[in-house]
Image (cartoon, helix red, strand yellow):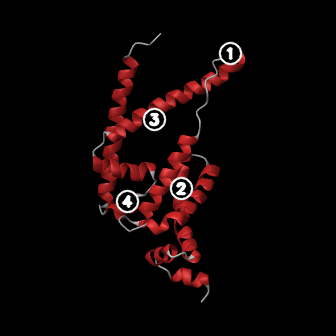
Amino acid sequence: MTSEQSARAWSESSAIRAAQHGDRDAFEFLYRLHSRRVYRVTLRILRDASDAEDLTQQVFLTLFRKIASFRGESSFSTWLHRIAVNAALMHLRRKRPVELQTESLDSDSLPTLAISDRFLRFTVDRIHLARAIRALPAGAKRLFLLHAVLGYEHHEIARLTGCSVGCSKSQVHKARKRLRKLLRRVWQTSANEPAVA
């Protein structure tokens, strides 16, 4: 039997066990099984196809080193996607924001200032969004993050969490409504604040 034929005969759990014992064919099977979803998750966070491709490879290198520590306390796909999300967030943190150039205020520096200004507004909006998400009830927050951030479809969320597809749709819809309400309140408050000189 060729390695390709034996790979096809594996279940995910038997491939995990074999990969934990150093079987490269089993690891390749897991890569083929999960790489597309890891790429989608990293692309959704990074919004750059090239970075997402590179990071997908890095996630699987990390997985190769860490797979022996997988204990099955959560599903393998949930565990792997946590690794992918953490890697993507670390990648974003390492990226430096555009520096404000304060040495000279000649006409050449104005485009840089404008870019930095937009970046700062975007950062403030992200902070408000993160706070609003933290304010969601735990169940709705979990389903919202699975759907809106990690990119899971409702039927996948139902399988991962044990809830129904209808429950997932309902909770995500309620979370979106609540977020809109919370953010509208924040933006109205900041619009009414006096400008600082």
**Mark 2 or 3, nearer chain start:** 2
**In the rendered structure, which disc, 1 or 4, sits on the residue that comes first in sequence?**
1
Q: Give the x, y percent position of residue 161.
A: 33, 61
Residue at 36 percent of width and 36 percent of height = 131
Q: Nearer the viewer, mark 1 or mark 2?
A: 1
Find numbered disc 4 in the image and state the secondary structure of the residue it sits on.
helix
Label 3 Cα crowd, 10 Å radius (few <14 / some 14-19 / many 20+): few
Q: Secondary structure at mark 3?
A: helix
Q: Position of residue 16 (x, y in %)?
A: 47, 73
The residue beneath circle 1 is 104
Q: x, y percentage for residue 121? A: 50, 27
Dot label at residue 40: 2
Going by the image, does 92 lie left or right of 134? right
Label 3, label 1: how many angstroms apart (C-alpha)? 29 Å
Give the mark, 4 or 2, whose residue is nearer the N terminus.
2
Q: Amino acid at mark 4?
A: Ile
Determine whether the residue tagged by mark 1 lies in a helix, strand or loop: loop
Seen in the picture, residue 35 relative to 103 is either above or below; the reply is below
Q: Which residue is mark 3?
A: 126
- Proximity of marks 2 and 3: CB atoms separated by less than 8 Å: no
Q: Amino acid at mark 1?
A: Ser
Task: Tell me which amino acid carries mark 2.
Answer: Arg
Which kind of residue does numbered mark 3 sit on? Answer: Arg
Q: Quadrant of residue 6?
A: bottom right
- Per the rendering, the mark at residue 41 is none
* C-alpha span from label 1 to label 2: 42 Å
Q: Quadrant of residue 182?
A: top left
Measure the C-alpha gap from mark 1 to mark 4: 52 Å
Query: Which quarter of the figure is the N terminus placed in?
Result: bottom right
Choose mark 3 or mark 4, whichever is in front.
3
Separation of residues labelled 2 and 3 (CA atoms): 21 Å
Residue position for label 4: 157
